[in-house]
Image (cartoon, grey):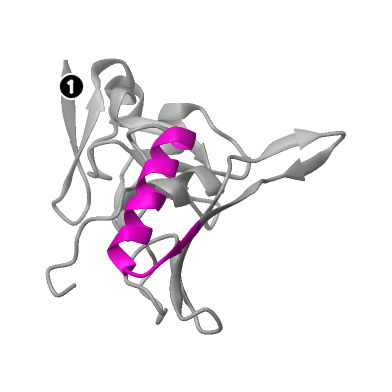
Amino acid sequence: MSRLITLTNGKVAIVDDKDYIYLSRFNWVDNNGHPSRNVNKRSLLMADFIMQRTRGRFRYYFKNGNTYDLRKKNIELLTFSQVGILLPKCSKICSSVYKGVFWDKRRKKWVAYIYSPSETVNNKRIRKHYYLGTFENEWLAAVAYNKKVVELYGNKAYQNKKETND
C-alpha cells in the first residue's frame, strides 16, 4: 500500500505505508521537483530519508520518471555515470542529434562510440572506450550505439530514437 503526503505548495508525494508514519510528522516543500525539508539551513531530500542515505556520490533514478513517487520500488540509487547512460543526449549544440554519435570532419563520416561501465582496479577508475565504426548515415551510427549500449548496460539504458526530419 502507499499513502500521500501533501507538500506546502499543494503537490503530493507518494510513499510506502512504512515510511509514511515517520515522514508525515514533518512539513515538506517542493524543491525543484523533489520533495524536501529544511534542517539547519540545509535542504534534505525526502528520498534521502526513505533510502536512509547520508552521503556519497550517487543520484536517485526514478524508474517511472515521477520524482514525487517515492515508493522504494520506484527509486534506484545510481552513480553519476550510470544515470548518464539512462538519460538522452544533452541539449548542448553538437554535430549529431543522437547520443554516442558525432561528425568526423576529416573522414567526412559519422562516428559511433561508447564508454563501458567503470571498474576499479588497484584504486584506479578504468573505463574502456568502444569505437563502433564510421557510417555514411547518422541514423546507422545511432543504431550501432543502441546495440552496444544494450549489450553493456541492458534494456533500461537510453536508446536513440529515429528523428522525423532525418
Residue 129 seen in render = yes
Left or right: where does residue 153 sit relative to residue 130? left
Give residue 165's quadrant in the image.
Answer: bottom left
Q: Which residue is mark 1?
A: 2
Residue 35 image position (x, y, % from top left) = 32, 47
- Residues 41 and 92: in front is 92
Instruction: Say which of 67 and 78 sits in front.
Output: 78
In percent of the image, x 35 and y 47: which residue is there?
146
For the residue carrying disc 1, how many other residues have a C-alpha within 10 Å: few (<14), some (14-19), or many (20+)?
Answer: few
Task: Give percent across and percent down for residue 113.
Answer: 51, 57
Residue 126 screen position, x and y as percent: 73, 44
Q: Quadrant of the C terminus?
A: bottom left
Q: Position of residue 157 (x, y in %)?
A: 37, 41
Secondary structure category for the residue under label 1: strand
**Point 44% across, 42% down: residue:** 148
| Three-letter amino acid code of the residue under disc 1 | Ser
- The residue shown at (16%, 15%) is 1
Q: Is residue 52 above or below residue 41?
A: above
Q: Residue at x 30, y 20 (%)?
A: 21
Q: Nearer the viewer, residue 103 or 29?
A: 103
Q: Which residues are magenta?
A: 133-153
